[in-house]
Image (tube, helix red, strand yellow):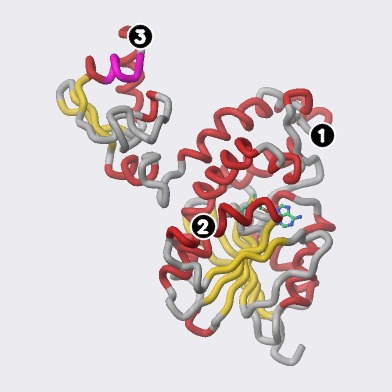
């Protein structure tokens, strides 16, 4: 529920309202334009889901909801991810049975959907929505990654497929000695620059526009791929890791972080659902285990590989370019 203005979130639809609670049931019913028969069940469901706390007839955001579900707090807001999950993704999932039987993509091309990033970015509103979603998607891993790697040993980092730079802003905000480069398709440049400036990081954080299919990757001591490999087939996964190897100096490190599936393929519900989900957009795409990723890293020439849990469904695989390479 949003935080700015009586209904929250800078012109947001009413259902994002009421961040400055507590608010009474009657008041929320009117503000959110709910039907009186629906309001109590809806709000109490949100209490049971731990999104709201209730005292008597008054409701307010739980502490966690007020950090992550408030559009008035852009740095920690994950509602963008929930919005595309509830619209674009929900539509594909209605066709799960068909996807399972045919292996065909289930996006609705006639409704303007496309599995191509270029097509997505051709529509500024869809691009904005996607960027907000990626911000939410990378927050959890970022919060852990900034502390779970020996950053003091390195000076530069390039994040490949950086989107608007959520991970790099978190990282450079925590480690003042680091300089960062975000590498992504050209349409991402303005959003990346705006966010870097807002964070006061423009002097250490730059953007390199490019296409990882056709361009070399930027050089840096550490290269990271956040939620990139699951979007592609095996050949592309391997191609990207080979390009990373070429771009790194001897002794450099690559970090792949993603919702990696657990070794027994029976625990990480999010990672397994993600694998089904990406298959519905790009039939040859798949999520993967940490062990699979370590195998691809070793095949690309990386040594001393290891996998570490980050947060929730997210893990990272790390590999090092040999100092003699
Ligand atoms: C699933 S998003 C992940 C964004 C971000 N790393 C994160 O963790 O939230 C994939 C990113 O890869 C970028 N991307 C897709 N195709 C690309 C290409 N050919 N070259 C460079 N970046 C690309 C997209 O623009 C998008 O920002």
Q: Residue furthest bottom?
A: 324
The mark nearer the N terminus, 2 or 1, is: 1
Is disc 1 in contact with disc 3, using a CB cutoff of under 8 Å? no
Tell me, yes or no, if residue 317 can be seen here: no
Please state if 71 lies on the left or on the right of 23 as rendered.
Answer: right
Tell me, yes or no, if residue 62 can be seen here: yes
Position of residue 225 relative to residue 93, above or below, is below
Point out the image quarter for the C terminus. bottom right
**Residue 291 rendering spot, x and y as whole percentages:** 68, 63
Q: Which residue is mark 1?
A: 103
Marks 2 and 3, how far apart at CA:
38 Å
Please state if 192 lies on the left or on the right of 108 as rendered.
Answer: left
Q: Secondary structure at mark 2?
A: helix
Q: Which residues are magenta?
A: 28-33
Q: Secondary structure at mark 1?
A: loop
Which residue is nearer to you in this view: 154 or 261?
Answer: 154
Instruction: Identify the disc placed on residue 231.
Output: none
Q: Which residue is mark 3?
A: 35
Q: Is residue 31 magenta?
A: yes
Near mark 2 (Cα within 10 A), the count class, few <14, some 14-19 or many ≥20, is many
Position of residue 125 relative to residue 170, above or below, is above
**Residue 282 rendering spot, x and y as whole percentages:** 78, 41
Instruction: Identify the disc placed on residue 166.
Output: 2
Please state if 1 lies on the left or on the right of 264 as rendered.
Answer: left
Q: Residue at x 84, y 58 (%)?
A: 235
Q: Secondary structure at mark 3?
A: loop
Point out the image quarter for the N terminus. top left
Q: How many marks?
A: 3
């Amino acid at each position: 529920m949003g935080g700015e203005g009586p209904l929250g979130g800078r012109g947001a639809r009413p259902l994002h309202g009421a961040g400055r609670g507590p608010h009474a049931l009657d008041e929320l019913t009117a503000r959110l334009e709910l039907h009186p028969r629906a309001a109590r069940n809806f709000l109490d469901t949100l209490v049971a889901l731990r999104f709201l706390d209730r005292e008597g007839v008054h409701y307010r955001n739980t502490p966690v909801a007020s950090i992550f579900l408030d559009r008035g707090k852009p740095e920690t807001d994950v509602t963008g991810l929930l919005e595309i999950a509830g619209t674009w993704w929900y539509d594909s999932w209605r066709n799960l049975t068909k996807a399972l039987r045919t292996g065909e993509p289930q996006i609705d091309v006639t409704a303007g959907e496309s599995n191509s990033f270029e097509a997505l970015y051709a529509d500024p509103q869809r691009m904005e929505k996607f960027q907000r979603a990626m911000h939410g998607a990378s927050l959890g891993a970022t919060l852990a990654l900034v502390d779970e790697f020996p950053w003091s040993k390195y000076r530069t980092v390039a994040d490949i497929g950086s989107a608007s730079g959520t991970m790099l802003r978190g990282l450079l905000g925590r480690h003042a000695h680091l300089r960062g480069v975000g590498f992504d398709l050209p349409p991402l440049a303005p959003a990346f620059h705006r966010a870097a400036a807002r964070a006061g990081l423009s002097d250490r954080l730059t953007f390199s526009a490019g296409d990882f299919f056709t361009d070399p990757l930027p050089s840096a001591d550490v290269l990271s791929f956040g939620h990139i490999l699951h979007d592609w087939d095996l050949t592309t996964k391997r191609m990207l890791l080979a390009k990373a190897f070429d771009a790194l100096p001897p002794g450099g490190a690559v970090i792949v972080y993603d919702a990696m599936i657990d070794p027994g393929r029976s625990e990480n519900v999010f990672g397994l659902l993600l694998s089904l989900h990406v298959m519905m957009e790009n039939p040859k795409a798949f999520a993967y285990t940490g062990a699979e990723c370590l195998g691809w890293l070793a095949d690309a020439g990386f040594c001393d590989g290891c996998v570490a849990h980050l947060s929730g469904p997210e893990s990272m695989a790390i590999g090092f370019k040999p100092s003699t390479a």
